[in-house]
Amino acid sequence: MPEDSLPALLEAVLGVGTDLELRTTLQHIVDCAAELTGARFAALVPVQDGGDGPHPSDTVRVPVRVQDEEFGNLHLAQKRDGNPFTREDEQLLRVLAVQAGIAIGNARLYETARQRERWIDGAGAVTTALLSGETAADALMTVAERARLLADAVAGVILQPTAEGGMEIVTASTYEDPGDIVGTTIEPGSPVLEQLLGGEPVFVEDSASDPRMTTHVRHRFGPSMMLPLQADGRLIGTLALPRRRGDRPYTAVERLLATQFASQAALALVLADTRHRRERLAVYEDRDRIARDLHDLVVQRLFATGLMLESTRRRGGAEDVQETLGRAVDELQSTIQEVRTTIFALQQPPAEAPTTFRGKVLREAAGAAALLGFQPSTHFTGPVDNLIPNNTATHLLTALRRALTTASHRPHVSRIDITIDATTTLPEGNRPGVRLTVYDDGTTDNGDGTGTTVTWQAPL
């Protein structure tokens, strides 16, 4: 090796190891090789990409090893001065290749450390998010989305066991519209199902061609990891992280980090669910206490006051006093019914769609309150939940919704009364029926100020 080449070689060797980012390190190696030898073209081709590559007669090729592993080959072609490559050029290249192997190894270690740090931070972020009070559906989406980003996957998918013994995709986070991914089912008998239900991780090189994969969406994906979400012996589901067809396969490090992430995410899901159940129980207990207090203290006192007023009215007296007492009795009876309605609402499970007819009516009233700025008054007569069949209830709720919408657009509305009477008798055929009455005090089209009353009725 000529002595005048040593300074340049030393500078190149030192420069190759100055950066810990793998891509930058590889570019340094190629640039230094071209500079040292005066090559017009230089390339470092990894073994996984076909490291041998084409090598015409004027090409120099030197292997690059990382510890005991063959990483790839460093190729040079066409010297800038037009002369052929010399033995000295090859010697310089071999020295550089040794240093390149060391630099690549260091860059790999650094990249692995950074990957591990990202996955640990991601798992911590998921745990924090799940314990902050998210709903079950939001919690699963948080896990799927964070895992997709960390794994550089095209989708983050969560499957859960079905009653039929299969597994169904219940959540999907994708770069684009998930389309028909959610709802896709792995049917019983699928070769991969036994592993998934057994809580085993499954690693797939190509989802489209792997015979174990049977879903209709498998042709969209390439390499994939399917990781158990399992904590305390409980299988919550499976986290699947597919990449696009043709994307690079997952490395052993990525598989390990993703598996650890899935284990921690599963534990966080269990803790979040336990906390949510505990909070719901506390809310139920508090709501029950409030309902009991309202019933025991407020309703009984209002009822007693109403009886006293009714007794006073029967004793006779001035007409204006009789009228005032009559209005007071009516207001008390209305207040008692309002409080009973509130008690019923408190006894319903919070944050869930109501299942009873009475609860659905109260939900419609609450929805109108958001537009009106005040709560409509709601009155029920008779056992509405038992007497009104489902089909009639559906039509009644539609009529109620329409009436509330119309009333909310009427000028100067400050009061709306909703009355549902399941003990009424219809004039047609003297049949038992249900009657909905919605009154509002808004300005009518003729401006008479008497308000508007809408009535709907149906036989029972």
Image: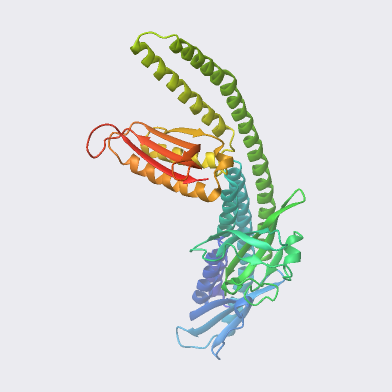
Q: In the rendered view, does 177 fall on the left or right side of 150?
A: left
Outermost residue to the front: 429
Q: From the viewer's perspective, is residue 155 above or below residue 247?
A: above
In the rendered image, residue 13, in percent from the top left (x then y), is placed at: 57, 67
Residue at 57% x, 51% y: name it.
142
In the rendered image, residue 144, in percent from the top left (x then y), is placed at: 59, 56
Q: Is residue 152 visible?
A: no
Residue at 29% x, 39% y: name it.
410
Q: In the rendered view, does 14 fall on the left or right side of 323?
A: right
In the rendered image, residue 19, in percent from the top left (x then y), is placed at: 54, 61
Comparing 173 with 440, the one in front is 440
Colour scheme of the picture: rainbow
Residue at 62% x, 29% y: name it.
288
Picture quadrant where residue 295 is located: top right
Q: From the viewer's perspective, is residue 32 above or below residue 411?
A: below
Picture quadrant where residue 184 is located: bottom right
In the rendered image, residue 259, in percent from the top left (x then y), is placed at: 69, 57
Q: Quadrant of the N terminus?
A: bottom right
Outermost residue to the left: 446
Residue at 47% x, 32% y: name it.
379
